[in-house]
Structure formats: structure tokens, C-alpha cells
Image (cartoon, rainbow, N blue to C red):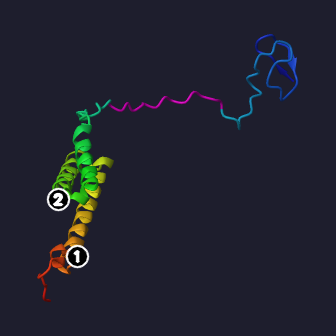
Amino acid sequence: MSFCPACGANNNDGSTFCMSCGARLQNNVPQSQPMYTQPVQQPTYAQPAYAQPSFPTPQVQPIDEKPSRKCLAAGILSIVFSWLGLSLIFGPVAIVKGANVLKKFGPTGSAIAAIVLGSIGLLITGSIVFVLIYYVYNGYFAAASSLPGMYYYY
């Protein structure tokens, strides 16, 4: 039997707490169990605060739609007037202006369309000129050959 140090009551052997008052019995604490101790506080590492590098924000230039519209208009005129041969004027204008817009603003749809339309207008005019030269050279449009006394020798 063990006695409680707080109230003096008799308790069974092996009891950890007093049956009367609930106080802890000192002599019955098993030796194999270590007493809980508060862990020692480890020093904490405080990382210094670093300032984020500041970069200047790029100024975005608003895209002016007028140059791209002008080159697109030149490309359209190159196609429309290709049968008159005026795409020899509008075609190179559309191609050069489209290339300038591409270089300055990057690939925009109207600049690419102007280059394509200007090229197509030049191809159409070149084809028409080739066909006309071929027909004139071969005498298909030889109105003068129908005049009396006019003979062509090939």
C-alpha cells in the first residue's frame, strides 16, 4: 500500500493517482517512462528580405491602322485595275507598303493581304500583256492586214 502525499489516503500498489483526491503519487511513477520535458527552442533563421528588381514597363505603341489600310487599298486597286495595266503602278506600291508595315508593326493581316493582292495583280497584268503581245505578234489583231495591198511575210 502506498500513501498519498497530499491527503494521506491509502492507495493500491501500482496506482499513479490517488483514489481520494486525484493527486499524483510520486513513488509509483515507473522508472522506464521518461518524464516529458519541454523541448529547447531552436534558434530560427530569419531570411533577409530582398527587394525585387524593378524593370521598366515597356510602352506599347498603339497600332495605327491607316498605313495598313492604305497598303491594302493599293493591293485591291492592283487587282481591280490589272486589266488596264495599272497594277504596274499599284502592285509595287502595295508590295512595298505592305513590307514596310510588316517591318514596323509585325505580321498584320492587311499587310500580308496587300502583298499577296499586289503580287496577284502584277501576275494578272503580266499575263494579259503576254497574251496581247503573243496575239499581236501572230497577227490575230492585225486589222491592217485586211487592207488591200498589205501583206505580211513570215
Q: Residue at x 80, y 21 (%)?
A: 17
Q: Is residue 131 left or right of residue 44?
A: left
Which circle marks residue 123 in the picture? Answer: none
Q: What's the residue at 26%, 42% (across, down)?
A: 69
Q: Amino acid at mark 1?
A: Tyr
Q: Is residue 95 magenta?
A: no
Q: Residue at x 74, y 29 (%)?
A: 29
Secondary structure at numbered mark 2: helix
Rendering coords of residue 15 (x, y %): 83, 26
* Location of the N terminus (image quadrant): top right
* Residue reaching furthest to the top: 7
Task: Please tell me in which quadrant of the rendered image residue 19 appears.
Answer: top right
Circles 1 and 2, Cβ within 8 Å, touching? The answer is no
State the residue in front, 11 or 149. Answer: 149
Q: Position of residue 52 (x, y in %)?
A: 29, 33
Quarter where residue 134 is shown: bottom left
Q: Disc 1 marks which residue? A: 135
Q: In this rendering, would 149 be left or right of 49?
A: left
- Name the secondary structure under disc 1: helix
Q: Is residue 99 left or right of residue 2?
A: left
Of residues 36 and 70, the one drawn nearer to the viewer in this rendering: 70
Taking 133 as reference, is 113 above or below it?
above
Magenta: predominant secondary structure element? Answer: loop
Tell me the CA gap for discs 1 and 2.
Answer: 21 Å
Residue 38 part of the magenta-drawn span: yes
Residue beneath disc 2: 88
Q: Is residue 49 above or below residue 89?
A: above
Q: Badge 2: how crowded within 10 Å, few (<14), some, or many (20+)?
A: some
The magenta stretch spans which residues? 35-48
